[in-house]
Amino acid sequence: AQRVTQPEKLLSVFKGAPVELKCNYSYSGSPELFWYVQYSRQRLQLLLRHISRESIKGFTADLNKGETSFHLKKPFAQEEDSAMYYCALRGSNYQLIWGAGTKLIIKP
Amino acid sequence: DAGVTQSPTHLIKTRGQHVTLRCSPISGHKSVSWYQQVLGQGPQFIFQYYEKEERGRGNFPDRFSARQFPNYSSELNVNALLLGDSALYLCASSLGQLRTDTQYFGPGTRLTVL
């Protein structure tokens, strides 16, 4: 089965604290994973993808095939990071399979 | 470029009615995908069209159908609406069908079925 699990519906951290948004996946084969972000009143937008191995807005995510995880991390949270974050997996038919999302709140 | 556009923004229908949602992709993009997002959940894949042909279909009943036009715009049709069809319907476009293609999302159409 192809599935993405984001165990936390809500994550609240203080500004300047580290952030880790969890994502676990189920997929047979080589997965292609993404993190999308949706800021308040804006559309979904791609944050990063594992094949690019890039850091966007200070966020990084490492694919761990052994643990089937793709956690999103940032060492020092900023207030503008408050948003809804979705982890997604490219399925065998090219479609995206999504987690339920984690709402990140950065407290001042 | 305004990005992916969708119309209408909001729509209210009653059970049993039919609805048509529209999507215009980014200029140059040939692939359009449709997703349903129920409140509190992530998007669920409905269809993908590429070069006017259906290339993928999610686990949705036959009441859901779509098509893509020669200008690559797309319509999603839902017949015999049920209360459970109330959701945000998202359209995403991408250049082609390569696994490396990024999907760009529209703002969505909020459908309420009463």
Image (spheres, rainbow, N blue to C red):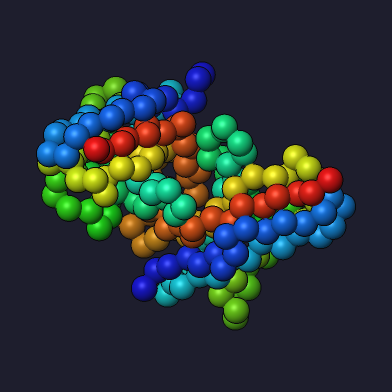
Q: Is residue A49 visible?
A: no
Is residue A76 shown left or right of residue A56?
right
User: Of residues A108 and B88, which is closer to you in this image?
Assistant: A108
Which residue is at a point 24% across and 25% down the rendered structure image?
B70
- Marks counted in the figure total 0
Q: Is residue B114 visible?
A: yes
Is residue A72 shown left or right of residue A46?
right
Q: Position of residue A95 (x, y in %)?
A: 38, 53
Residue A83 placement: quadrant? top right
Asked if A61 appears above or below B67 in the picture, the reply is below
Asked if B27 appears above or below B17 in the picture, the reply is above
User: Of residues A83 and B54, which is closer to you in this image?
Assistant: A83
User: Of residues A44 and A80, which is closer to you in this image?
Assistant: A80
Residue furthest top as drawn: B1
Classify the position of the N terminus of chain A by image quarter: bottom left
Residue furthest front as drawn: B114
Q: Position of residue B4 (x, y in %)?
A: 44, 28
User: Of residues A89 and A75, which is closer to you in this image?
Assistant: A75
Residue furthest bottom as drawn: A66
Which residue is at a point 23% across and 31% down the rendered structure image?
B13
Which residue is at a point 42% across and 75% down the rendered structure image?
A28
Is residue A11 shown left or right of residue B23?
right
Residue A20 placement: quadrant? bottom right
Q: Position of residue B16 (x, y in %)?
A: 12, 39
Q: Position of residue B74 (x, y in %)?
A: 28, 30
Which residue is at a point 84% across and 45% down the rendered structure image?
A108
Is residue B94 shown left or right of residue A24?
left
Asked if A44 appears above or below A33 in the picture, the reply is above
